[in-house]
Every structure is written in C-alpha cells, then in structure tokens.
Image (spheres, grey):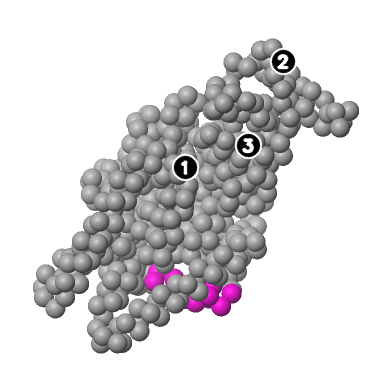
C-alpha cells in the first residue's frame, strides 16, 4: 500500500494550534490539516463535500470540523459526515510527525 | 423585469444564475483575523440554555394564564404574550438551531429545532435544505427559495402574513402534501432524495397532533385548544414578520456581497430576545457559524467595513416601504448601499 503513497512535507508542527485547522495546497490538491485536542494530526480533503467551501475557515470542536458556510460537520479522524447538509464523507489521508515537521501521505 | 414565475427554482432565471456564475460565486467577507474569528465562532451551551429556559417558562406561564382566565378579558394579554413567544420566537429558534450554532451540544440544537419547527409549521427537513440554499444563493433570483419581497412585490401577501394568514395556509398545505409522501417541484430541487422519508414522517406526526387538537376543540365546543396549539402561529406571527421583512427587502438582488442585499438594524432588548439577535443580519450571512450571542461582538469587529447599521425598525420601514411601493411600477428600483470599501466583486445586477 505504501508504494502507492507519496509522503509530502506539509508544515512545521508549530504552524498549527491545538484544536485547529489550516489549509494547505499539496501537489495542487487542497488539504485540511487538523491538530486534535490530544495533539494528534489528521488530514482530510480541504473542501467541504457539500458545496466545495474551504474547511480551513471553519471551526474545530473536539474531533469535529464545521464548514464555515452551512455548518455541515465531519469527524475529521474518519471523514464521516454528521448529518445534513452533508451527504458525502470526506477523504482522509495518513499523517506522521518527523521531528518538528508534519508529513501527509497522498496517493501517487 | 422579473415576473413571479422567474422566482421559480426550475425556470429560466435558475439557468441564468447558473450560467452567469452567481450560484458558484465567491461571496465577499470582511477581513477578520483567524484568531479573532475562532473566538467569535466558539460555542457554549449556557447562553442558549438560559434563553431556552426563559422562553419555555414564559410560554408555560403566559399560556397557563391564558387558559386559566379564558372567558375573561385577562385572557387576551396572556395570549398576546403567548402568541409572540409561540408564533414569532419559534422562528428565530428554528433558525439558530437549524444552523446548529445556538448550543455547543448538538442534540440540544436538534431538540429545540424540532420543537420550534412544529410551532412555526416548517418541515424540519425541507426547511433545513431551503435555508441551506438561502445561504448559498442569498437573494439570487431563480435560486433562493426564501425571498420575501419579490419584484414586483405583492404587498398584500406580505401584509396578510403579519397575521400568518397566507403563510399558515401554505404551511398546512405543505404539511398535508408531505404527509402523503410528496414534495413540490421547488422542494424537490434542493432536498436530496435520501432526506425525503424524514420529511414525510415528521409531517405525519404533525397531522396526528393537529387532528387531536381539532378533536379537542370539537369535544369541548371551544377554540381554546387551538388557542394553545396552531392559532398562535397566526395571532403571534406579527413580530417575526415585522423583523424578518427588514432582512433583505428593497435591497439589491443577484449580487455576491451581503452588504448590498442584507440589512442590519438596531433593535430593543425584548425584540432581540425574541429574534435572537438576527437584527445583525449582514453579520449573520457573512459569517453564519458565529452564534447569535456573539453577533454583537462580530458587529463591532466589522462595523467599519459595513454600511451604517439602520437605526431601528421605524427607520428600516421608512427606507424599504417607499421602494417596495415603487417596485410595483418599476421593479428594477432598489436601494443601492454605499459601501465603505470598494466592492470586491462585480455586481451582476
């Protein structure tokens, strides 16, 4: 599986606050990178599946990201939508820490 | 010039809005630093729990007094208060809990949403999607299902809705249609099929409740049961229409800047409680994830980037009524706001 993935250097650990999200453009793909309340990193597609709004402008509450336009919610650990207006889950991507850097794996 | 048919969500204007990029446009947002916006978006349960306790307690007290004093003159002031709490405060609770911003805890939003939807007679599923579209395409002709003052405006329709008359008839008709398992063509254009069953189930439960209420009226040979359930949507609607009409009426349509198509007004504290601060309506549309209890702070944060706030209901109606009257003969007339900063996007008027 790992042969199909390419690890990208996304950002420094300190670029993102605890319980927050930042938006990244990695290889032309919008990505949302989250730092959870227990200091883990998660990555999902950067745009809401409902109307393609940037999730990085939204609010992180515990393990939920709320879209800034229509308040659609996802569990950013699994990408699962949590009710209307979300009808489609988010894609998620593996992350890992390497020293003070955060890496994200995207499919080749 | 538009006709009423152009406000259909499946007509020529719908295609025009899509073709001209109005439906996928980037809306203007006043600059707010991310750190500050995070503070403004933060949710708490306490303010909405406090307000909900006050609301429900006031409903029980005023409704109880209305019932207890039925047949005397004292019943009318009691039902006056009860009506506004039932027929108008339910509108703002429907709205805020539909956005999911009133409470931090989502089941609380969902519970109050269902309660308020019943009172205001808005199907919780159909109206969730209707309001979602209203925020995507605010006052975009052919896309927004919640345009109150169409051009040319049919003022009598707005006027009778201060007493919920037309609105209630249409709502009950929708409820019966939903109960038989059907959506109208506009609803079908924005409610996904996977959501239809939910809409129909709630409508069937509501029909049962209304049937019980009517049976109680017949059994007691009195309209008192209807004064408690159903009729307050008529006699208590005036406050939500009074405030709601000011939100967009007379302003621009087909623009991608809420400063041009939405109005914020100053309001007294009682009306703000009933309306849950939706008088800060430009702010709400620009940043819908900010809960109602932080809208005054948001207003201060971005006030310099907005047109001056309208100085109360009287000032709002003094501005909008002449324009609505003028639009009957000249539908292209509208109020063009002067903006403190250059408009970021083409107006698309």
The image shows residue B146 at horizontal and vertical percentages of 47, 58
Subunit ID for the residue under disc 3: A
Number of numbered markers: 3
Name the element at disc 3: loop
Residue that numbered label 3 is attached to: A76
Is residue B169 shown above or below A27?
below
Q: Residue A107 in the image: x percent, y percent?
A: 82, 32
Residue assigned mark 2: A98
- Magenta stretch: give its range: B167-181
Task: Mark 1 vs mark 3: give the one in front.
Answer: 3
Question: Are the numbered discs 1 and 3 placed on the same chain, yes or no?
Answer: no
Q: Is residue B315 above or below residue B13?
A: above
Q: Are marks 1 and 3 in contact (CB under 8 Å)?
A: no
Residue located 30% across and 83% down the image: B217
Tell me: residue B82, above or below residue B101: below
Q: Earlier in the sequence, mark 3 or mark 2?
A: 3
Q: What label does residue B288 carry, if any?
A: 1
In the rendered image, the residue lying farthest to the top is A99
Q: Nearer the viewer, residue B80 or A14?
A: A14
């Amino acid at each position: 599986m790992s042969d199909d993935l390419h690890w990208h250097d996304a950002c420094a650990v300190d670029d993102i606050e605890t319980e927050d999200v930042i938006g990244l453009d990695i290889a032309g793909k919008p990505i949302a990178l989250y730092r959870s309340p227990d200091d883990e990193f998660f990555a999902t597609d950067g745009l809401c599946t409902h109307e393609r709004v940037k999730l990085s402008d939204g609010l992180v509450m515990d393990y939920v990201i709320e879209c800034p336009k229509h308040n659609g919610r996802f569990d950013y650990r699994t990408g699962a939508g949590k009710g209307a207006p979300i009808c489609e889950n988010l894609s998620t991507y593996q992350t890992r820490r390497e020293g003070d850097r955060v890496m994200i794996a995207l499919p080749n | 010039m538009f006709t009423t048919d152009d406000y259909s969500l499946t007509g020529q204007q719908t295609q025009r809005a899509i073709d001209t990029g109005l439906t996928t446009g980037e809306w203007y947002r006043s600059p707010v630093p991310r750190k500050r916006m995070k503070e403004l978006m933060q949710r708490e349960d306490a303010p909405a729990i406090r307000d909900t306790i006050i609301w429900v307690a006031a409903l029980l007290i005023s409704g109880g007094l209305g019932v207890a004093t039925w047949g005397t003159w004292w019943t009318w002031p009691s039902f006056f208060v009860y009506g506004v709490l039932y027929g108008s405060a339910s509108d703002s609770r429907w709205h805020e809990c539909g956005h999911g911003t009133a409470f931090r805890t989502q089941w609380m939003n969902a519970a109050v949403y269902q309660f308020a939807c019943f009172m205001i007679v808005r199907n919780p599923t159909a109206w969730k999607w209707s309001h979602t579209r209203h925020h995507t395409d605010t006052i975009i002709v052919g896309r927004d299902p919640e345009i109150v003052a169409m051009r040319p405006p049919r003022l009598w329709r707005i006027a009778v809705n201060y007493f919920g008359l037309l609105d209630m008839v249409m709502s009950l008709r929708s409820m019966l249609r939903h109960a038989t398992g059907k959506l109208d063509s506009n609803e079908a254009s924005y409610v996904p099929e996977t959501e239809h069953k939910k809409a129909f189930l709630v409508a069937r439960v509501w029909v049962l409740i209304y049937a019980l209420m009517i049976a109680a009226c017949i059994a007691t040979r009195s309209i008192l049961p209807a004064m408690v359930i159903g009729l307050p949507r008529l006699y208590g609607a005036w406050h939500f229409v009074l405030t709601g009409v000011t939100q967009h009426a007379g302003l621009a349509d087909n623009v991608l800047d809420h400063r041009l198509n939405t109005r914020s007004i100053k309001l007294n504290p009682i009306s703000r409680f009933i309306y849950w601060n939706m008088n800060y309506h430009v702010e709400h549309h620009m940043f819908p994830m900010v809960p109602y209890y932080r809208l005054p702070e948001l207003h201060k944060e971005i006030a310099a980037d907005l047109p001056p706030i309208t100085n109360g209901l009287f000032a709002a109606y003094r501005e909008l009524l002449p324009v609505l009257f003028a639009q009957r003969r000249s539908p292209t007339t509208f109020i063009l706001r002067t903006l403190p900063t250059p408009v970021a996007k083409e107006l698309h008027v």
